[in-house]
Image (spheres, grey):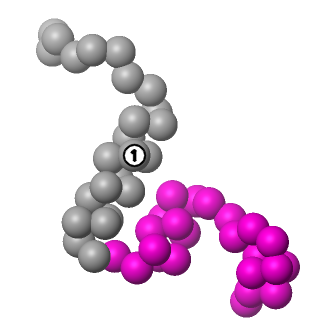
Amino acid sequence: MLNIPHWSPHDLRRIVRTGLSRLQCPSEVATAVLGHSRKGIEGTYSI
């Protein structure tokens, strides 16, 4: 077995977000990949 310190599913999300940033992925796309929804007026009126 691998000796991996304690981690959580949130750690995987953080790794994915960091990788997308390194690839210069637009923030809107990265947010959608992670399954986050838009907040406020932007979330209300976006298509």
Q: Position of residue 21 (x, y in %)?
A: 31, 66
Q: Residue at x 51, y 58 (%)?
A: 34
Q: Is residue 26 above or below residue 5?
A: below
Q: Quadrant of the C terminus?
A: bottom right
Q: Position of residue 24 (x, y in %)?
A: 28, 76
- For the residue pair 37 and 40, the one nearer the viewer reads as 40
Q: Is residue 44 above or below residue 32?
A: below
Q: Residue at x 43, y 46 (%)?
A: 13
Q: Is residue 1 above or below residue 33?
A: above
Q: Is residue 22 left or right of residue 34?
A: left
For mark 1, what is the residue?
Answer: 14
Q: Position of residue 22 (x, y in %)?
A: 23, 66
Q: Give the magenta part as a residue range.
A: 25-47
Q: Amino acid at mark 1?
A: Arg
Q: Position of residue 43 (x, y in %)?
A: 77, 76
Q: Is residue 30 left or right of residue 35?
A: left
Q: Quadrant of the N terminus?
A: top left
- For the residue pair 18 and 47, the one nearer the viewer reads as 18
Q: Is residue 41 left or right of residue 37?
A: right
Residue 44 lies in the magenta stretch: yes
Q: Is residue 39 left or right of residue 15?
A: right
